[in-house]
């Protein structure tokens, strides 16, 4: 398992037309996963509102969030 950091933005609609950036303060999450695709899927499962994935990078274990 590798620590991945996933960057994302919140939106109010599934077509990504109405941003909800000012309503949320979290824009990245660091978590353990086997692949970057698995890390993206874990992030997408945590939110009920639409999020747009901006990128994925290798993180550090001390950056891990719940």
Image: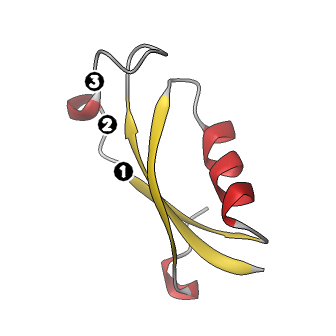
Q: Quadrant of residue 24?
A: top left
Give the label, 2 or 1, closer to the camera. Answer: 1
SS state under label 1: loop
Q: Name the N-terminal-most of marks 3 and 1.
A: 3
Q: Is residue 30 left or right of residue 28?
A: right
Q: Which mark is residue 48?
A: none
- Circle 2 sits on which residue? 24
Residue 10, image x, y percentages: 38, 33
Residue 57, image x, y percentages: 49, 72
- Mark 1 neighbour class, 10 Å CA radius: few under 14, some 14 to 19, many 20 or more: some
- Residue sitting at x 79%, y 71%: 34
Q: Are marks 2 and 3 in contact (CB under 8 Å)?
A: no
- Circle 1 sits on which residue? 27
Q: What separation in Å lies between label 3 and label 1 (alpha carbons)?
A: 13 Å
- Circle 3 sits on which residue? 19
- Mark 2 neighbour class, 10 Å CA radius: few under 14, some 14 to 19, many 20 or more: few
Residue 55, image x, y percentages: 45, 57
Q: Are marks 2 and 1 in contact (CB under 8 Å)?
A: yes
- Mark 3 neighbour class, 10 Å CA radius: few under 14, some 14 to 19, many 20 or more: some
Q: What separation in Å lies between label 2 and label 1 (alpha carbons)?
A: 8 Å
Q: Name the N-terminal-most of marks 2 and 3.
A: 3
Of residues 36 and 63, the one nearer the viewer is 36
- Residue sitting at x 50%, y 25%: 50
- Residue sitting at x 26%, y 33%: 21
Q: Are marks 3 and 1 in contact (CB under 8 Å)?
A: no
SS state under label 3: loop
Query: Where is the N terminus found, in terms of image quarters?
Result: bottom right
Q: Is residue 25 left or right of residue 35?
A: left
Q: What separation in Å lies between label 2 and label 3 (alpha carbons)?
A: 10 Å
Residue 40, image x, y percentages: 63, 52
């Amino acid at each position: 398992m590798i620590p991945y950091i996933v960057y994302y933005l919140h939106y109010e609609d599934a077509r990504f037309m109405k941003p909800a950036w000012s309503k949320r303060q979290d824009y990245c999450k660091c978590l353990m996963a086997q692949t970057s695709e698995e890390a993206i899927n874990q992030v997408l499962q945590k939110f009920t509102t639409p999020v747009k994935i901006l990128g994925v990078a290798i993180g550090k274990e001390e950056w891990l969030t719940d």
